[in-house]
Amino acid sequence: MIEQGVYKIPLVLPASLEPQRKKFDKTLAAAQKRLKNFAEKNGWEAFIKENFVDHAEIFDNKNRFDQTFLKLHDEKPSTKLPKTVSAALEKRIFIAVSPKLYSKNYPEGIEEKSFEKLITHEMAHRLHIRILDGDEHAMGPVWFYEGFAIYAAGQFEKSRAKLNSTEIWEIIKEQERGSYKNYSFVFRYFLTRVSINDLVERAGKKDFLDWLRQVDNQ
């Protein structure tokens, strides 16, 4: 343990990325520190006392990343993943493409400390589940649980995206995955009206959208 809530994570790298090992180690620690600060700010420090990751692996090849991703998620090897899928934390194993591949495949996500934030994002999903006592079904709709992780990681904080009320509710009602920048805006929009703790508590309930409507109309 480096400090409470921040741990030394064993890291597997291909030969091409081995010269960057110290940099990756620092980034993994910084990502945990970022999540720790978020958790402490919102009264969730108890949920980060145990680490989230047994080991991490960073890939210099998207196809190898994809196959590892599918294996971790018990998916068929023939499943096609979008090129923007860049990281995951499943079965206490964190995997990610290299920062270079991340920048190439998901240019929308590039900002200051974007790779560090990517790591925090995946860990934030696990924090979210711990807060809910392990009930993944209580995480709410996609826009919400991705919005939570985006907010926890500090992603898109400087985004200039602006949505009106109609656009916000169109995003909320979408069935397919959409823009993370839009998710960020919608999540932060509701944080101006109600606390993150209340949002997390209500997100898994059947009346969540009705409740949000009431919050929005206040």
Image (cartoon, grey):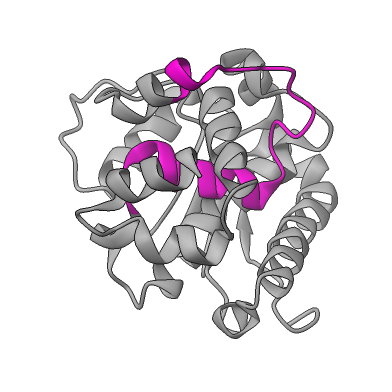
Question: What residue is at 80 percent from the left and 82 percent from the top?
Answer: 3
How far across and how far down the image is residue 210, in percent?
Answer: 28, 45
Q: Is residue 141 magenta?
A: yes
Query: Residue 207 or 1: which is nearer the viewer?
Result: 207
Query: Residue 174 or 99: which is nearer the viewer?
Result: 174
How far across and how far down the image is residue 66, in percent?
Answer: 38, 31
Q: Is residue 92 magenta?
A: no
Q: Quick check: 93 above or below 182?
A: below
How far across and how far down the image is residue 30, in percent?
Answer: 80, 58
In the drawing, does residue 14 fall left or right of residue 81? right
Query: Residue 100 or 131: which is nearer the viewer?
Result: 131
Q: Is residue 58 visible?
A: no
Question: What residue is at 64 percent from the left and 32 percent from the top?
Answer: 98
How far across and how far down the image is residue 189, in percent?
Answer: 60, 37
Question: What residue is at 20 percent from the left and 31 percent from the top?
Answer: 77
Segment colored magenta: 140-168
